[in-house]
Image: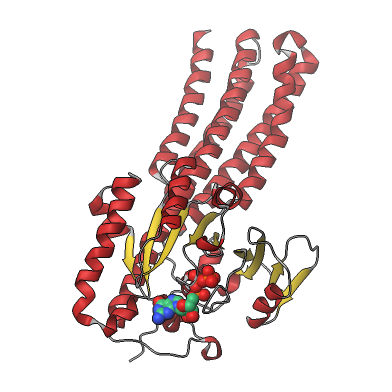
């Protein structure tokens, strides 16, 4: 029977946590935008009728909020999840990425293949495009081999970044806002700090690809130590790749696996102090064959790897799927927390500022109470709407927004009652 698994239309992917949260937070900010709009009209009216009621600096601040909210909306629309792959030359970084992309997009080969940073991100267009640094021209890519041609015809520094805009249509991972970064072998560069500075500070997940035939090297460890110094608690996965090679030595498999596990756990848990051993053993280290995984997923026979499966491949395919699932859970959770928590805080600041300013005015003026209560009612209705939209978001973010709206309502209501 066929062992191909087609996840292209997988609606239950953990990545949906991020994509749903993005939709939700966009809606929230659209609501905030309309609240800001109403308020700024109201405040402009107040300013015209009675300057005593509103301090000039508050008024000026309020008039800038529209711009600020629009800026946040545009940042949200560009927010994505980012994963960086690294490891020694020829360990199979590009092959792992291709397997995850379910197509042979990146050039792979023996020896030193990837010679600069390659970032794969989504485009709504139907055709892939390559963006080479320093050249304005967009190179369209008609087929996969022209990506490697486009790359090899340019003289590129090892720390330059080439972008491949890949049609979202073609790949679930890309469609769900994941951006993947491939790197040159860590052993061919001396400037690891610059790498981190340039490409890694906004990464949500790091994937170290090791060849199971060798072991984790000093330069790989040094890189991760530097990452852990710059970022608090980075998410690191270790892939023991080329595990298909163990098919030739079945009697060795268990002892080799144990050796790799011991070293990897010692590094992640004792040296870097990132998580406990049980968590790391279950969710952070995987024994895979990227070659077999790609063979299993790539539906285009002309670009499929030539050689077939080794004995025991089903287990390795299963392990690859397990890795991918953990990876998707981890990256979407982290990205929601780091990116959207900031936005949520900004949103709260804006609402609180406006509500306080308006409450202040109402406090000072005895007159337009009635009118304001109607306005407040409208805001409350909006919050009911938000509540509904928020269902798919993480509980903590949800709790926070609820807190904001309740807080705002309570404070304003109290101000009115106090009078
Ligand atoms: P650079 O770009 O040079 O840094 O290498 P890389 O880490 O991107 O490695 P790449 O994906 O180009 O793979 C190197 C070679 O190893 C290729 O010939 C792959 O086909 C092969 N390879 C990758 N993964 C596996 C695997 O799981 N098993 C086996 N047997 N070969 C693999
Ligand atoms: Mg490569």
Residue 17 visible at all? no
Front one among 71 and 402 = 71
Front one among 169 and 4 = 4
Q: Quadrant of residue 322?
A: bottom left
Image point (73%, 29%), residue name: 64
Question: How is the structure coloured here?
Answer: secondary structure
Q: Quadrant of residue 213?
A: bottom left
Please count the marks in the image. 0
Is 122 placed left or right of 390 in the picture?
A: right
Residue 268 in picture, x, y percent from top left: 33, 51
Residue 218 in picture, x, y percent from top left: 41, 56
* Vertical relation: 122 (above or below) 418: below
Residue 19 in picture, x, y percent from top left: 51, 56
Is 251 placed left or right of 408 in the picture?
A: left
Is 80 placed left or right of 155 in the picture?
A: left
* Vertical relation: 388 (above or below) 109: above
Residue 296 visible at all? yes
Image point (76%, 11%), residue name: 50
Image point (67%, 59%), residue name: 160
Residue 369 in picture, x, y percent from top left: 61, 16
């Amino acid at each position: 029977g066929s062992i191909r698994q087609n996840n292209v239309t997988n609606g239950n992917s953990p990545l949906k946590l991020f994509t749903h949260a993005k939709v939700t937070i966009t809606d929230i900010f659209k609501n905030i935008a309309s609240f800001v709009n109403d308020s700024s009209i109201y405040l402009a009216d107040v300013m015209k009728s009675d300057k005593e009621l509103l301090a000039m600096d508050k008024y000026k601040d309020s008039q800038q909020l529209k711009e600020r909210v629009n800026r946040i909306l545009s940042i949200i629309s560009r927010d994505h999840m980012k994963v960086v792959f690294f490891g020694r030359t020829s360990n199979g970084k590009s092959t792992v990425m291709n397997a995850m992309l379910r197509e042979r997009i990146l050039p792979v080969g023996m020896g030193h293949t990837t010679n600069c940073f390659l970032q794969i991100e989504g485009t709504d267009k139907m055709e892939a495009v390559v963006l080479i640094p320093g050249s304005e021209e967009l190179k369209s890519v008609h087929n996969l081999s022209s990506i490697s041609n486009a790359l090899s015809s340019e003289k590129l520094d090892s720390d330059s970044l080439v972008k491949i805009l890949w049609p979202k249509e073609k790949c679930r991972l890309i469609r769900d806002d994941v951006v993947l970064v491939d790197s040159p072998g860590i052993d061919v560069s001396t400037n690891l700090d610059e790498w981190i500075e340039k490409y890694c500070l906004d990464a949500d997940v790091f994937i170290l690809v090791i060849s199971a035939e060798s072991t984790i090297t000093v330069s790989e460890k040094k890189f991760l130590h530097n990452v852990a110094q710059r970022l608090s608690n980075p998410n690191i996965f270790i892939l023991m790749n080329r595990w298909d090679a163990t098919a030739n030595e079945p009697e060795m498999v268990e002892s080799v696996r144990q050796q790799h596990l011991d070293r990897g756990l010692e590094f992640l848990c004792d040296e870097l102090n990132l998580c406990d051993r049980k968590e790391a053993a279950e969710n952070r280290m995987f024994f895979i064959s990227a070659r077999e995984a790609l063979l299993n997923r790539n539906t285009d026979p002309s670009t499929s790897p030539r050689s077939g499966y080794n004995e025991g491949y089903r287990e390795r395919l299963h392990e690859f799927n397990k890795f991918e699932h953990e990876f998707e859970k981890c990256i979407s959770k982290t990205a929601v927390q780091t990116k959207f928590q900031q936005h949520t805080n900004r949103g709260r600041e804006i609402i609180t500022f406006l509500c306080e300013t308006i409450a202040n005015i109402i406090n000072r003026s005895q007159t337009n109470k009635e009118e304001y209560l109607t306005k407040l009612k409208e805001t409350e209705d909006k919050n009911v709407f938000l509540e509904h939209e928020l269902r798919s978001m993480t509980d903590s973010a949800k709790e926070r927004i609820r807190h904001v709206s309740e807080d705002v309502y309570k404070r304003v209501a109290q101000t009115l009652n106090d009078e």
